Amino acid sequence: MNYLKFAFSPAVFAVFGPTTIAQPLSSGQFVFEKLIYHSSHCNGLCPQIDMEIDSNNDVLLKREFWKGKGEIDKRRSGKFKGKIAAETYSQLITTLIASDYSNLDFPPVFCCDLPITTIIVYANGKRTQLSSMTPPEKARKLTDLLYSLSTTLNIPTTTEEFNLENRN
């Protein structure tokens, strides 16, 4: 799958608001390809979420919500495919840049009954993976935004089969 690559200048975000820059890359610009977000199920009512957002604003989403122990909420669960609004996409990119995601340190905690949060970012020609049951406080705005998007997005359901990249 080919992705459109957009260059985002953090300075343009800060001064003029979210703007896509269609020009050759130079230092200080951000080239986003896609982001993959997972939040695993726990022994309680934590939803299972798998979401991918690419640079074309395309979203693939699988989610499983629980009404009670072993009882799936079929109304909110399923597979979805669609696009996010340009404003939402800009908010994602702004939050991603502001999080300084490539310098975040997710502690390797995978021991307990908590959901595992995994974020995989393809940007600037690199792959960055973050995964932990206890993401750092510095990642809070990013993880809150991703969780909110994945649990509230109103995009069409699909019967299409897709598997999203998972953590290594």
Image (spheres, rainbow, N blue to C red):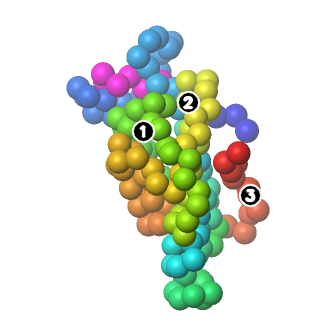
**Res. 4 image quadrant:** top right
User: Is label 2 in a helix, a strand or a loop?
Assistant: strand
Placement of the N terminus among the 4 image quadrants: top right
Q: Is residue 104 left or right of residue 79?
A: left
Q: Position of residue 62 (x, y in %)?
A: 62, 64
Callout 1 touching callout 2 (CB < 8 Å)? yes
Callout 2: 10 Å neighbours few (<14), some, many (20+)?
some
Callout 1 touching callout 3 (CB < 8 Å)? no
Camera-nearest residue between 99 and 63: 99
Q: Is residue 139 left or right of residue 167?
A: left
Residue that numbered label 3 is attached to: 162
Residue 24: say if magenta. Answer: no
User: Is label 3 in a helix, a strand or a loop?
Assistant: loop
Q: Position of residue 122 (x, y in %)?
A: 59, 34
Placement of the C terminus among the 4 image quadrants: top right
Q: Tag 3 or tag 1, which sits nearer the N-term? A: 1
Q: Position of residue 49 (x, y in %)?
A: 57, 63
Residue that numbered label 2 is attached to: 123
Magenta range: 4-12
Camera-nearest residue between 70 and 134: 134
Q: Amino acid at mark 1?
A: Leu
Q: Is residue 78 above or below residue 57?
A: below
Q: Is residue 3 above or below residue 27?
A: below
Residue that numbered label 1 is attached to: 96
Callout 1: 10 Å neighbours few (<14), some, many (20+)?
many
Callout 3: 10 Å neighbours few (<14), some, many (20+)?
few
**Res. 61 image quadrant:** bottom right
Asked whether residue 21 appears in the rendered view, the answer is: no
Q: Tag 3 or tag 2, which sits nearer the N-term? A: 2
